[in-house]
Image (spheres, rainbow, N blue to C red):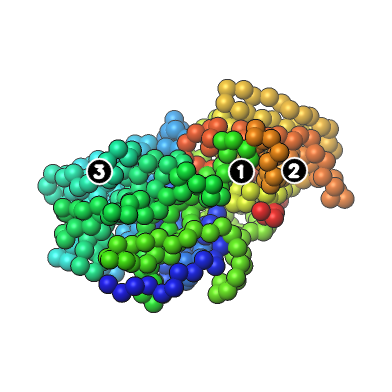
């Protein structure tokens, strides 16, 4: 097998910042496409396009109709959609994903990755998360799931053709063999998996065999990617997918986190998508250096993804990066009621409610600023940074008053109140990442909440430790989302700004 071009450590990582875990990638000609998990958020499974694997643009969400994605009001945070596999085969895109909140494994197709995607084909006979799709040379379709086991399927009907077979359990003693991807490369079939769990011990291992059904022989160098036990600024690396460039080069996309603060280190942006070069030695892949954000040729300094961004709410539809917990009915969220404004009609009384009307975008930078101009004349609502129903900070406006609310696990507190004029008001949240740790107990960042005066001055009303909105505290698989919400009546938002700071 040909070796790859030089390994290059000059691109910025993460390549897709913010809560974008479990990346799966494929290439069609010169174009790369990538899908991620989206859990309890609607629309589901964000899809990205790139020409260089470094600069990605979100082109849509695969599951954007209620007929494709059912997330009942009682579905758990960090439930919903897990770990898609995206492939291009026989002239179309195939996406297989698990809805752990009810519908199980689902398969979708599209001729254009930007959509529209089909309604789901159900796979009731495929049990297990992290489904992979691979086609044998004779057209046989294999579905491989965490565990790791495999079953032959008819991808058009979702029928299983035969009994599932155990393929490989990964490194003896390592927990959670999952995220399988099967590839026919050269003379071998390769079975790539994640193991060690998605936390600090996460890693990627590989085995190879002569047929898609094995038997599989483990790579002597396993794990081929892990940062466990290191002081690398990028941790939890695992859940990878391989792709070959048109020039013959090989690459791996995978998830990782960027912890900040003292001990044990907290990550607040969720699991993000990273990229590393791959070379082949003795027909085994060797993963090159994983580097943090930096700039040098041949790629220019990575532009932050969709940031800084002003959302003016002028367009009829929200950009694909805007997500909501579980559902987003148009009668509760519209730009048509008041021209140039986003109108949110409350459902649920606060962000503690799983059905709250909240529309947000992922926080993608450890240091950032979000602002919105809200008119609360007909209701109550505001600007929030949210990890889940039980972990959020918000600044909420009602006619004549704003208040800062913090919800941390079972505790809920009104941290500050402040009088304002009855009219529209600019709400502001800033996060400031911890750069230097002076105390082992220091948190990952500080979250500042307040209002902005007409002259632009920030009136800070509360300064809260960001650790309580981290995965290490809240648990689960997602990351922070910053956005606007309504908790009573109808609340109107004229614009929303998200600006990255220096990381
Ligand atoms: C996913 C599993 C994992 O299904 O976390 O990191 C789970 N890997 O493969 C949820 O993202």
Q: Are there few (<14), some (14-19), or many (20+) residues within 10 Å of tag 2?
A: many
**Residue at 49% in and 58% down:** 290
Residue 307 falls left or right of residue 195: right
Spatial CA distance of label 1 from label 2 is: 26 Å
Circle 1: element type: loop
The quadrant of the image that shows the N terminus is bottom left
Determine whether, in the image, residue 13 is placed left or right of residue 86: right
Q: Nearer the viewer, residue 329 or 257?
A: 257
Viewed as shown, does residue 183 lie left or right of 247?
A: left
In this view of the protein, which residue sits in the foreground, 50 or 404?
Answer: 50
For the residues marked 1 and 3, what is the alpha-carbon distance in whole angstroms? 33 Å
The secondary structure type at the circle numbered 2 is strand
- Whether the residue carrying mark 2 lies under 8 Å from ligand 1 is answered with no
The crowd level at tag 3 (other Cα within 10 Å; few <14, some 14-19, many 20+) is some
Question: Mark 3 — residue?
Answer: 169
- The numbered mark at residue 260 is 1
Q: Is residue 286 above or below residue 361?
A: below
Left-right relation of 93 to 485: left
- In this view, the residue farthest toward the left is 162
On residue 427, the disc is 2
Picture layout, residue 17 above or below residue 424: below
Picture quadrant of residue 71: top left
Residue under the image location 41 percent in, 74 percent down:
5
Q: Residue at x 70, y 54 (%)?
A: 501
The answer to whether 487 is drawn above or below residue 322 in the figure is: above
Residue 496 visible, this angle: no
Q: Is residue 276 visible?
A: yes
Q: Position of residue 312 (x, y in %)?
A: 67, 56
> At x 44% / y 30%, what residue is drawn?
74
Give coordinates of residue 341: x percent, y percent. Answer: 67, 51
The residue lying toward the viewer, choosing from 487 and 175, is 175
Q: Nearer the viewer, mark 1 or mark 2?
A: 1
């Amino acid at each position: 097998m040909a070796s790859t071009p030089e390994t290059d450590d000059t691109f910025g990582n993460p390549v897709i910042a913010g809560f974008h875990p479990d990346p799966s990638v494929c290439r069609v000609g010169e174009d790369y496409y990538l899908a991620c998990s989206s859990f309890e958020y609607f629309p589901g499974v964000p899809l990205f396009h790139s020409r260089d694997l470094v600069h990605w643009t979100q082109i849509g969400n695969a599951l954007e109709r209620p007929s494709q994605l059912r997330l009942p009001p009682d579905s758990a945070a960090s439930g919903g959609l897990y770990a898609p596999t995206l492939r291009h085969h026989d002239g179309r895109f195939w996406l297989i994903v698990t809805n752990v909140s009810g519908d199980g494994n689902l398969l979708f197709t599209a001729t254009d990755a930007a959509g529209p995607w089909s309604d789901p084909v159900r796979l009731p006979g495929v049990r297990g998360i992290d489904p992979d799709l691979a086609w044998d040379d004779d057209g046989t379709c294999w579905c491989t799931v965490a565990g790791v086991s495999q079953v032959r399927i008819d991808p058009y009907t979702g029928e299983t053709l035969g009994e599932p077979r155990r393929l490989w359990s990964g490194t003896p003693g390592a927990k959670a063999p999952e995220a399988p991807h099967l590839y026919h490369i050269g003379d071998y079939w390769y079975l790539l998996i994640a193991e060690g769990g998605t936390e600090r011990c996460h890693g990627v291992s590989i085995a190879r065999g002569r047929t898609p059904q094995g038997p599989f022989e483990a790579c002597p160098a396993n794990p081929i990617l892990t940062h466990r036990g290191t002081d690398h600024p990028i941790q939890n690396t695992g859940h990878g997918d391989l792709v070959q460039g048109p020039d013959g080069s090989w690459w791996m996309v995978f998830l990782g986190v960027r912890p900040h603060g003292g001990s044990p280190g907290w990550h607040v942006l969720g699991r993000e998508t990273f990229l590393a070069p791959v070379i082949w030695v003795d027909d085994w892949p060797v993963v090159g250096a994983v580097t943090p954000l930096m700039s040098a040729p041949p790629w220019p300094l990575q532009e932050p993804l969709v940031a800084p961004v002003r959302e003016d709410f002028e367009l009829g539809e929200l950009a694909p990066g805007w997500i909501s917990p579980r559902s987003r009915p148009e009668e509760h969220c519209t730009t048509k009621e008041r021209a140039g404004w986003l109108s949110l009609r409350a459902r649920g009384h606060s962000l503690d409610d799983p059905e709250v009307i909240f529309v947000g975008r992922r926080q993608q930078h450890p240091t950032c600023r979000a602002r919105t101009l809200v008119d609360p004349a007909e209701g109550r609502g505001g600007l929030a940074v949210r990890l889940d129903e039980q972990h959020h900070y918000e600044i909420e406006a009602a006619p004549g008053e704003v208040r800062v609310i913090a919800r941390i696990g079972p505790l809920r507190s009104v941290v500050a109140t402040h009088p304002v004029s009855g009219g529209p008001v600019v709400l502001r949240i800033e996060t400031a990442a911890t750069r230097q740790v002076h105390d082992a107990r220091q948190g990952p960042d500080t979250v500042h909440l307040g209002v902005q005066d007409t002259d632009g001055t920030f009136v800070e009303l509360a300064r809260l430790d960001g650790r309580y909105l981290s995965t290490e505290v809240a648990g689960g698989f997602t990351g922070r989302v910053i956005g606007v919400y309504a908790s009573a009546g109808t609340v109107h938002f004229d614009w929303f700004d998200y600006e990255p700071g220096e990381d």
